[in-house]
Image (tube, grey):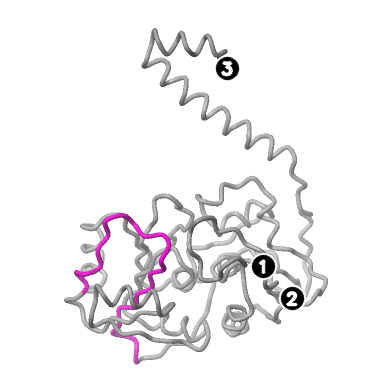
Amino acid sequence: MKFKQLSNIEKLFLKLSDGRGYRKYKRQLQAHLEAEFYLQQTRQLKHVNLNHAFKQITSFKHSGNSGDIIYSLPATFALAKNGKANLYIDVNQPANYGSMYHPLGNVLMNDKMADMLLPLLQYQDQIGIAEKYRGEPVDYNLDEFRNYSFYLDRGSIVRWYFNVYGISYNTANPWLNAPKDNQFQSCIVIARSHRYHAPLVDYSFLKKYPNKLFIGIEKEYEDMKQVLPDLQFKAVNDFLEMATIINSCKLFIGNQSFPFSIAEALKVTRLLESYYKVPNVIVDGPGGNEFLYQPQFEYAVKRLYEE
């Protein structure tokens, strides 16, 4: 049934005569306006080329954050099919993070982060070349998802690319490789950015667990050390080293930040601190766990640590 918007007089009459009906109308109006906006955006789309012919080498460009690039790899490998993928990182493209703090400031990817990410990408068997973008012609611009009418604060980052290119990939299986280092096999590795904290979640109960290691930004570590005084910090030279630590640990705990994208791609035993306002990181496949609330957090750590 087509939704009928009321005039100002009709709304006032409904509000005065039927409060419950008025509140229902307001909810229906909001849903109608959101749907109309989505339909308008969808009608204006200029869809990408969907003729995905096989090539021995398929080239890609991406300007997003490190996590966005990790989450784009399933689509990259699906589009490359059984051929090699050349992946170019376009640095210093402008970003708008709103009022939320972001370590990259006002860009999506800077040179330092690209330099740290490239060794991890170069380690992957299906990636032929991983370099900074210098104007090379590419087959696929993976930033195209930004031109579509996705609500980027929800859903699955991985699947945005699937919906753009009409493809799929089994994301229950690992899509990233990294070495292992036995010195980290008994560690609980923690990464918690300043953004995306679940409300009322307290990490202090982890004091009773030994061998806790923090990876990420030192300021983030300093905050966590106030809660966990025995927490150790591990600086890394690049993200291949970070992936090695994550791939080797007993348990990884992270929120919706870059290190969790590595843990998700590797399918290690992992525990995600989900953020209810931006539920766009989806745990999938073996080893995957998540929490929103404190009792479930503590129970999950106990269960996973003892397995």
Give the CA separation, mark 3 to mark 1.
42 Å
Check residue 190 for magenta coloring.
yes
Which is nearer the eye, 136 or 20? 20
Q: Which residue is mark 1?
A: 63
Q: Which mark is residue 5?
A: 3
- Could you tell me what secondary structure mostly forms the magenta stretch? loop
The residue located at (36%, 91%) in the rendering is 182
Up-down relation of residue 152 to residue 272 (above or below): above
At label 2, counting other C-alpha atoms closer than 10 Å, the crowd grade (few under 14, some 14-19, many 20 or more) is some
Up-down relation of residue 68 to residue 134 (above or below): above
Q: Which residues are magenta?
A: 183-206
The residue located at (76%, 53%) in the rendering is 48
Q: Which mark is residue 133?
A: 2
Q: Secondary structure at mark 3?
A: loop
Which is nearer the eye, 55 or 25? 25
Check residue 248 for magenta coloring.
no
Look at the image and tell me in which quarter the N terminus lies. Answer: top right
